Amino acid sequence: MMILAGAFVAPLHAQEAAAAAPRATVAQWSIITAGFALAFAAAFGALGQARGLSAAVEGIARNPSAAGEIRGNLILGLVLIESLVIYVLLVSLILFFVKPF
Amino acid sequence: MDKLEHPLWIVQAVNAALGPLVARLLHALGRPVPHGDVIPNYLVMAALIVLGWTILSLIARSTLSVENPGRLQILLEDGIAAVQGMLHDYVGQKGPRYLPIVMTMFVFILTGNLMGLVPGLMAPTSNINVTFGCALTVAVYYHLQGVKEQGLVSYVKHFAAPPGAPLFLAPIMLPIEVISHLSRVLSLSLRLFGNIFGEELVILILFSIVPFLVPLPMMFLGLITATLQAFIFVLLTTIYLGGAVATEHEHEEHGEMVAGEV
């Protein structure tokens, strides 16, 4: 019975300890932010690239003789999308390593 | 960030040989002398690329022949022909005139990217100073060529009122165009730097988790990234050049290709 009571009391103690602990600092928040930013950037960048890629493949399947030109435009578009993700990667890297605060 | 790099013997050797001289020069010019390596890694690596390609080109030149070209000659000729074809596609009739700088950029960046995968060397393009230098060179060059081709007045007018836009939009168009041209430098340099540095970081992280065989697929991916990024840099350079040197009557055929991209 005492052990059971202890098991219920222990989380309460833990909660008090957590409340007494210092709040998350700017550094911790920036690491969380950097991770989420990169995840979102990669997800939506991949979505955009997938749309472009599927359209290009469809175009090549319909008209194989235009493959060269479509491929050139596809690479250009993919790179312009990708560079936005790379910007977010750089922001995250700055937050991780340079710690500008 | 500095902890990610380890001392390279070739950089140590160059610093031992030329370091005191450069330090004295910097001191004489009134610049602060860095402690540690006076000549940074990326400068040594960039000089190495220049040296290597000079030697390779001299070797290729000494064995040039029309009847039975060697392997090296065929490889270099194919590369030049590919870049020449790209210039012809995107710039037009006068494209091959800009072959030297475009080919130099391609060779420098490709070699620089691939150097990161060689043990004992590092990729100079994983440093933002080098990529920013490349992008700045390209930007200055295409503006100069544009002024040379169209004249200063019509080149600036081309900024204020692009063909097809009415003149009263000039107060809006001019800042937009200036910002877009400045962002080209930023995007060119940051794209190359981010790709190469990010790829090296991924390989490093995988190495720190499992230092055997697991980073190999990533290194193969790095091979593709290196080639693709060099190609992309040159492709965008060519497009910017094409946009800058296109004269009025050529805009009808090249306009839609140049418009609408950053």
Image: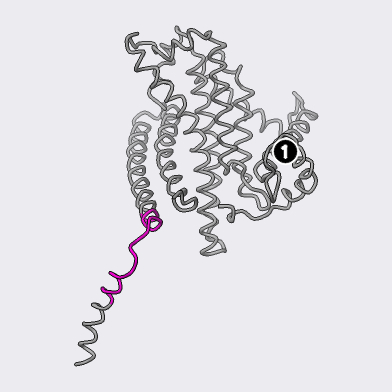
**Does A44 sit above or below residue B155?**
below
Per the image, the residue denoted by label 1 is: B26
Quadrant of res B22: top right
- Asked whether residue A20 is drawn in magenta, I would say yes
**Does B113 sit above or below residue A1?**
above
Choose between A95 and B116: the one closer to the eye: A95
Quadrant of res A67: top left
**Which residue, as the protein is rendered here, is positioned at the far bottom?**
A1
**Does B42 sit above or below residue B135?**
below
Choose between B132 and A21: the one closer to the eye: A21
> What residue is rendered at 56% in x and 23% in y?
B140
Q: Is B186 displayed left or right of B115 in the figure?
A: left
Q: Secondary structure at mark 1?
A: helix
As shown in the figure, which amino acid type bears the numbered disc 1? Leu
Query: Which residue range is magenta in the image?
Result: A14-32
Q: How is the image coloured?
A: one colour
Q: Is B22 displayed left or right of B140 in the figure?
A: right
Is the magenta region chiefly helix, strand or loop? helix
Choose between A92 and B195: the one closer to the eye: A92
Count all numbered tags in the image, as a single digit. 1
> What residue is rendered at 77% in x and 25% in y?
B65
